[in-house]
């Protein structure tokens, strides 16, 4: 399967598509945080910050694979 990666252009500088995926996963993660707080998901993890980082990495991986 061939991907036609389109570069992100900001001010005449070409950026890799990974930068857009990282920004999108950050926005998605920040949008999910209030929902996960209501569902009390943070209580599952001994270190909630590691859980948040794991969520970010999973979302970033999914965006990279499926987009």
Image: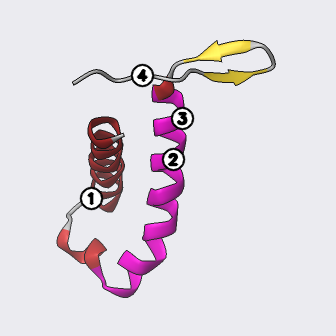
First along the sequence among labels 2 and 1:
2
Q: Is residue 21 magenta?
A: yes
Q: Nearer the viewer, residue 8 or 36?
A: 8
**Colour mapping:** secondary structure
Q: Dot 4: within a 10 Å radius of its alpha carbon, few (fewer than 14), some, or many (20 or more) residues?
A: few
- Do the CB atoms of the residues marked 2 and 3 lie less than 8 Å apart? yes
Name the element at disc 1.
Answer: loop
Would you say 46 lies left or right of 40 here?
A: left
Name the element at disc 3.
Answer: helix
Q: Which residue is mark 2?
A: 24
Region of the chain picked out in magenta, as a range: 18-40
CA distance separating discs 4 and 2: 19 Å
Residue 49 spot, x, y in % from top left: 35, 55
Nearer the viewer's eye, disc 4 or disc 3?
Answer: 4
Query: Any mark on residue 20, and which?
Result: 3
Residue positioned most to the right? 11
Magenta segment, principal secondary structure? helix
Q: Dot 2: within a 10 Å radius of its alpha carbon, few (fewer than 14), some, or many (20 or more) residues?
A: some
Q: Image height check: is 66 above or below 2?
A: below
Q: Residue at x 64, y 14 (%)?
A: 14
Would you say 51 lies left or right of 26 here?
A: left
- Do the CB atoms of the residues marked 2 and 1 lie less than 8 Å apart? no
Q: Quadrant of residue 37?
A: bottom left
Q: Which residue is mark 1?
A: 47
């Amino acid at each position: 399967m061939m991907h036609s990666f389109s570069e992100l252009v900001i001010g005449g500088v070409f950026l890799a598509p990974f930068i857009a995926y990282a920004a999108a996963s950050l926005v998605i993660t920040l949008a999910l945080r209030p929902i996960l707080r209501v569902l009390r998901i943070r209580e599952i993890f001994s270190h909630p910050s590691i859980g948040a980082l794991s969520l970010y990495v999973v979302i970033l991986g999914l965006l990279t694979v499926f987009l």
